[in-house]
Image (cartoon, rainbow, N blue to C red):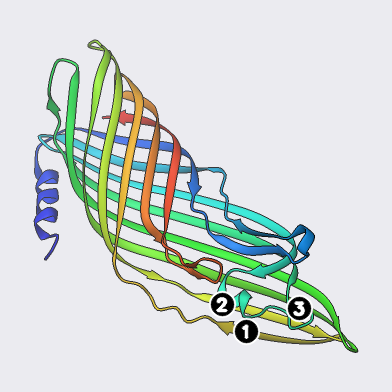
Amino acid sequence: MRYCGLLLICCLGWATPIQAAELFGEFLYWKATEPVDWVLNTNRLPANQYINYEQTVYDFAPGFRVGMSLDGTWNTNLTWTHFRNQTEDTATGKLTAAFLGGKESQPPAPQLYFDRGELEATINYDVIDLDLSRSMEMTNGLRIRPVVGMRAGIIRQSFITSFEASYVSGMTTSQRNIVETAESNFWGIGPKVGIDGEYALLRSSQFEMNLTAGFFVSYLLGDWSLPDETRITQINNGMTSITSQTIQVDSRDFASLSFQSMVGLNVRRGPWSAAVGYEINDWLNQCQIFTDASGPQNNDLLLQGLTANLVWQF
């Protein structure tokens, strides 16, 4: 019942007389920022002691946004945004795993530490927006559009860490290898509000060039699932044993607040238009995993970078 009124407005928007329709595709080149500690590297020598936490660092990666809009008395816009970002890292030294499964699987005395570690972290981001708006001409060159709508999102994050250590204890030569997969998987749905607009730099009957900007807020009621599985391979004097353990973390049910802003430049000629700009999406408290390095995580997920689109009106 919470969203019935909003859904009714959206349906009425589809029911209004249609003056034009648009299909569009958008190329994204974004970078994810969400530092998560995955390993502690330390040196216990008093003359050269250090403690260093290694964090996830993502680079730029491509993505896309596709959709359609119906223009009438009200404008109805439906879009799907997909983005995937992945990173890898390695470390050597006296290593302590940050995720709980690896921490509980540290080699026994006298070794205590892993010799080598690897990380593979992945973010899969899928968001669907259904927006209803109405264009208002403020001055000769300025046009704004208040926006109200719905947003549904699935954000899946995985952190795969592997560690290995070789050591001798008494008459036993040992090797320990572990692989841990920790995930922070979110889904949610909720209302979205905002405003965007454009200011005409050039305008004629056949050609337009506009500065554009927009700001939106969404509030998604949802759920986080946080599975954490570790596989331990122990080799003692050539004899191999394999065990596994599961870290029990309760799912979390609360809302996720996100902010979206963009600035850019678009041009229109006939039924075609194109735009290029910069976009920022800030998802608060998106990473909800727990690590032994820094405790419970409530890290923001920041996605930002280039957007470029092409629109066909018919």
Instruction: Look at label 2 and name its amino acid.
Output: Glu
Q: Which residue is mark 3?
A: 176
Disc 3 residue crowd, few under 14, some 14–19, many 20+, Cα 10 Å:
many
Quarter of the rendering occupied by the N terminus: bottom left
For the residue pair 275 and 221, the one nearer the viewer reads as: 221
Relative to 229, 307 lies left or right? left
- Which of pointers 1 and 3 lies earlier in the amino acid sequence? 3
Disc 1 residue crowd, few under 14, some 14–19, many 20+, Cα 10 Å:
some
**Count of marks placed on residues:** 3
Q: Which residue is mark 2?
A: 229
- Which of pointers 3 and 2 lies earlier in the amino acid sequence? 3
Instruction: Look at label 3 and name its amino acid.
Output: Arg
Instruction: Tell me the mark number nearer the camera, choosing from 3 and 2.
Output: 3
Instruction: Tell me the mark number nearer the camera, choosing from 1 and 3.
Output: 3
x, y percent for residue 153: 34, 57
Distance in Å between CA atoms under marks 2 and 1: 7 Å
Q: Which SS class for mark 2?
A: strand
**Outermost residue toward the front?**
47
Quarter of the rendering occupied by the C terminus: top left
Q: Which residue is mark 1?
A: 244
Instruction: Look at label 1 and name its amino acid.
Output: Ser
